[in-house]
C-alpha cells in the first residue's frame, strides 16, 4: 500500500508537472490576444478621433470660406440681405459651436479667429446701414 501511494503521488506530481506548462502557455496566448484586441480598439479610437479632427478642420475651413465670401459682399448688402446672411451665420455657428467641445486646440483657435473676423464685419455693416438710414432720414 505504501508503494502504491508513492506511485500515485509520483504519477500525480508528474501529470501536474506536464499540464502546468500547457496551462501557462494558454494563459500567455490569451493575454497576448487580449492585448492585441485592446491595441486594435485603441488604434480604431485614435483613427476615429483623427477623422473627427480632420472633419472639424474641414468644416471650419469651409465655414471660413463662406464667411470670407459674405464679408466681401457685405459692403453692398441691403438690410434685408444682411438679415438673411446673419440668420444663416447664426444657424451655422450654433451647429458648429455645439460640436466644438470635441475639437483640438488648433481648430478651436481657428474657429475663434473666424468668429472674431465675422464680428468685425458685422460691426462695419451695421455702422454702414445705420449711416444709410441716417442719410435717408436727412433727405
Image: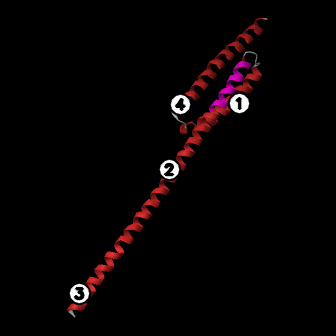
**Residue to which mark 2 is pinned:** 42
Disc nearer the start of the sequence (4/3): 3
The residue mark sitting in front, 1 or 4, is 4
**Residue to which mark 3 is pinned:** 6
Please tell me which residue is depicted at 52% across the width and 49% down the height of the picture.
43
Residue closest to the far bottom: 1
Disc nearer the start of the sequence (3/1): 3
Residue 73 in the image: state x and y as whole percent: 74, 19
Please tell me which residue is depicted at 34% across the width and 76% down the height of the picture.
18
Question: Which element is circle 2 on?
Answer: helix
**Residue to which mark 1 is pinned:** 88
Please identify the quadrant where the C terminus is shown. top right
Q: CA distance from mark 4 to mark 3?
A: 75 Å
The residue mark sitting in front, 1 or 2, is 2
Residue 5 in the image: state x and y as whole percent: 24, 89
| Range drawn in magenta | 60-73
The residue mark sitting in front, 4 or 3, is 3
Amino acid at each position: 500500500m505504501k508503494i502504491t501511494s508513492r506511485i500515485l503521488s509520483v504519477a500525480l506530481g508528474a501529470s501536474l508537472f506536464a499540464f502546468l506548462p500547457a496551462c501557462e502557455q494558454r494563459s500567455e496566448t490569451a493575454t497576448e490576444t487580449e492585448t492585441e484586441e485592446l491595441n486594435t480598439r485603441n488604434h480604431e479610437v485614435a483613427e476615429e478621433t483623427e477623422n473627427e479632427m480632420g472633419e472639424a478642420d474641414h468644416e471650419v475651413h469651409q465655414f471660413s470660406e463662406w464667411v470670407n465670401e459674405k464679408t466681401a459682399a457685405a459692403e453692398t448688402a441691403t438690410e434685408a440681405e444682411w438679415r438673411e446672411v446673419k440668420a444663416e451665420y447664426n444657424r451655422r455657428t450654433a451647429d458648429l459651436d455645439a460640436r466644438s467641445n470635441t475639437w483640438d486646440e488648433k481648430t478651436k483657435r481657428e474657429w475663434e479667429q473666424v468668429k472674431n473676423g465675422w464680428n468685425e464685419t458685422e460691426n462695419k455693416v451695421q455702422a454702414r446701414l445705420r449711416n444709410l438710414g441716417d442719410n435717408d432720414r436727412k433727405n
